[in-house]
Amino acid sequence: MSKLFKKTARKTYYFCTKKYYFCTHYHLIRSSMKIMHEQVCFRGTNSFNIKWDEFPHFTFPWHFHSEYELVYVIKSYGKRFVADHAEDFTDGDLVLLGPNLPHFWKNDEYFFNEDPDYKVNAIVIHFPTDFFAHQIENYPEFASIGKLLEQAKRGVHFPKVTALKFDKSLHLLLKQEGLERTLNLLSLLNGLAQSKNYRILASKSYQPDRQNWTGNRMDRIMHLINSNYRQQLKVETIASEIGMNNAAFCRYFKEKTGKSFICFINEMRVGYACKLLQENKMTVSEIGFESGFNNLSNFNRCFKRITQHSPLSYRNRFISAHQR
């Protein structure tokens, strides 16, 4: 028996037999996989993101991000890994994750056989650490939410009965916009905080392996992108600044963010364009160039791919929603 397995085996003796496989499997994953730092972009002036996921199987690798994440799995099953915790998940799985908490969902093998009966349906919400931070810290009405978010730093799992109770609210968030949507999220978080029988996932002894997460190189890259994304920013410019060749930089960036450099830049540009469209002070063409796109057709194509609306339709919908 190798030293690696002996160490894992000794650790798993402390748990029940059911968790033996999970702990061993988790240890091997941690040993063989590099953790990825996902960069979450908030579009326009949105204070949080919500999306509907529908695909054959979960694909996102072992990763973390700086935001809170609420994951509601409506249809799917497999194994869920959060920090040093692992267990089965199935339909109705509802989990709240704190910032910088590594995690991933892994489907069973049946989901990889291109069978249409096996697929993932999920609702995923990301919100930043400063979401109503002052109110949560200082106002007694927000105390229960504050406690829940503190516990989410180790991951929180809600029983299926709780997930079903808030199923309607979660689906409604997908359709809402503006203040109505924000208030619904606050109500949802308060309801979850008041619920009973939720479980903390990561152990009290869990210590994040921060040395493998991010460092000066990624910080420099993000600074360069944030300072220059509205200009004609090229791969070779960033790669040269941090001392890498183009191919190595592209591999590194994709590994750390889960997205290609061009895709990441376009999402930032579209997010900025959403803000300008909401302000309604410039033409669509002017906004496209101001956001960093070099021609109108490319702007329209990228904008629709990311938001599912044309720039003009997005502006009209926003104006209409705020004139009610």
Image (cartoon, rainbow, N blue to C red):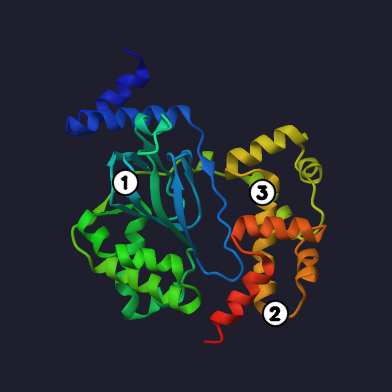
Q: How far apart, in angstroms, are the residues tagged by discs 2 and 1?
A: 46 Å
Give how far apart the Cα atoms at labels 2 and 3 are.
Answer: 26 Å
Asked whether, in this view, residue 15 is left or right of residue 308, the answer is left
- Residue at 47% from the left image edge and 39% from the top image edge: 59
Horizontal and vertical percent for residue 39? 57, 51
Q: Is residue 130 left or right of residue 110?
A: right
- Local crowd size for mark 3, using a 10 Å CA cut-off: few (<14), some (14–19), many (≥20): few
Q: Secondary structure at mark 2?
A: loop
Numbered badge on residue 25? none
Q: Earlier in the sequence, mark 2 or mark 3?
A: 3
What is the crowding at mark 2: few (fewer than 14 residues within 10 Å), some, or many (at least 20)?
some
Q: Which numbered tag is attached to residue 263?
A: 3
Q: Which residue is label 1 attached to?
A: 202
Numbered disc 3: secondary structure: helix
Q: Position of residue 211 (x, y in %)?
A: 52, 40
Name the kind of residue labelled 2 in the image.
Answer: Asn
Q: Which residue is at the far front?
A: 116
